[in-house]
Image: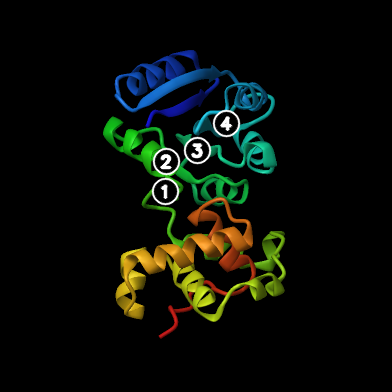
Amino acid sequence: MTIRVLVADDQKLIRAGFSTLLAAAPDLEVVGEAVDGADAVRQVHATQPDVVLMDIRMPGTDGLSATELITSDAALKDVKVLVLTTFEADEYVVAALRAGASGFLGKGVDPEVLIDAIRVVASGESLLSPSATSALIGQFLARASDGVPHADASSLDVLTEREREIVALVGHGMSNDEIAARLFLSPFTVKTHVNRSMAKLDARDRAQLVVHAFQTGLVRAGQPPPD
């Protein structure tokens, strides 16, 4: 299957470099290049890419605003956003996740890592750079003082007891294999529970499931995983 990619960056040389790099991968196709966030939103509607490579700092409509416009549009529910920036600061990571991004990488990553990241995000998984751990997400999202709106804890009522347990472990940054080993389940069973939980909570991907776990208080910063 060919993965359709839109590249959004205000610097022409960077756009051209990414496009050339991605075009060399047999399973990737660059369907457009956007010069800013507003252009990215327009082109996403026009081309319906699978993944958008989105720079954060662009003139006019920045990458975070564009990401939120894309991820909040029901007509674009299958479009994933992978944020790329030279500013790999904690605040940007959390802002990107809050905006609905499925992944976050610094622009200095190796080409192979970037291509693999696109494949991971396109498959529906989330991808965070090493600095964006669940502890980091909790540090920023679980504090009422930072002005982050918290989700209503009653939204978790749609989950079964097992799904709730697995969402909590996802929020602690555990992989499906780690959860499976911990709960004596098969990885396939865990994946099924994760997918059902995402559907019930209207989470686009695993990253958004982590955010929801913190915003509802199901997981708290510094809290160890449940036994």
Which is more foreground, mark 1 or mark 4?
1
Are the residues flagged by discs 2 and 1 in contact, CB closer than 8 Å?
yes
Tell me where residue 89 appears, x and y as whole percent. 49, 46
* Mark 2: few/some/many CA within 10 Å (<14, 14-19, 20+): many
**Disc 2 residue type?**
Leu
Disc sitting over residue 105 in the figure: 2
Q: Can you identify the residue that label 3 sits on?
A: 83
Which is more foreground, mark 2 or mark 1?
1
Alpha carbon distance from label 3 to label 4:
10 Å
Are the residues flagged by discs 1 and 4 in contact, CB closer than 8 Å?
no
Q: Is mark 4 on a helix, strand or loop?
A: loop
* Mark 4: few/some/many CA within 10 Å (<14, 14-19, 20+): some
Tell me where residue 104 appears, x and y as whole percent. 46, 43
Residue at 30% across, 38% down: 113
Are the residues flagged by discs 3 and 4 in contact, CB closer than 8 Å?
no
Q: What element carries label 3?
A: strand
Q: Which of 4 and 151 is in front in this view?
A: 4
Are the residues flagged by discs 4 and 2 in contact, CB closer than 8 Å?
no
**Disc 4 residue type?**
Arg
Sequence-wise, which precedes: disc 1 or disc 4?
Answer: 4
Residue 135 shows up from this direction = no
Sequence-wise, which precedes: disc 2 or disc 3?
Answer: 3
Residue at 55% across, 37% down: 79
Q: Can you identify the residue that label 1 sits on?
A: 127
Sequence-wise, which precedes: disc 3 or disc 4?
Answer: 4
Q: Can you identify the residue that label 4 sits on?
A: 57
**Disc 3 residue type?**
Val
Instruction: Give the left or right position of residue 62, taking residue 205 as reference.
Output: right
Are the residues flagged by discs 2 and 3 in contact, CB closer than 8 Å?
yes
Alpha carbon distance from label 1 to label 4:
20 Å
Instruction: Give the left or right position of residue 166, taking residue 177 as reference.
Output: right
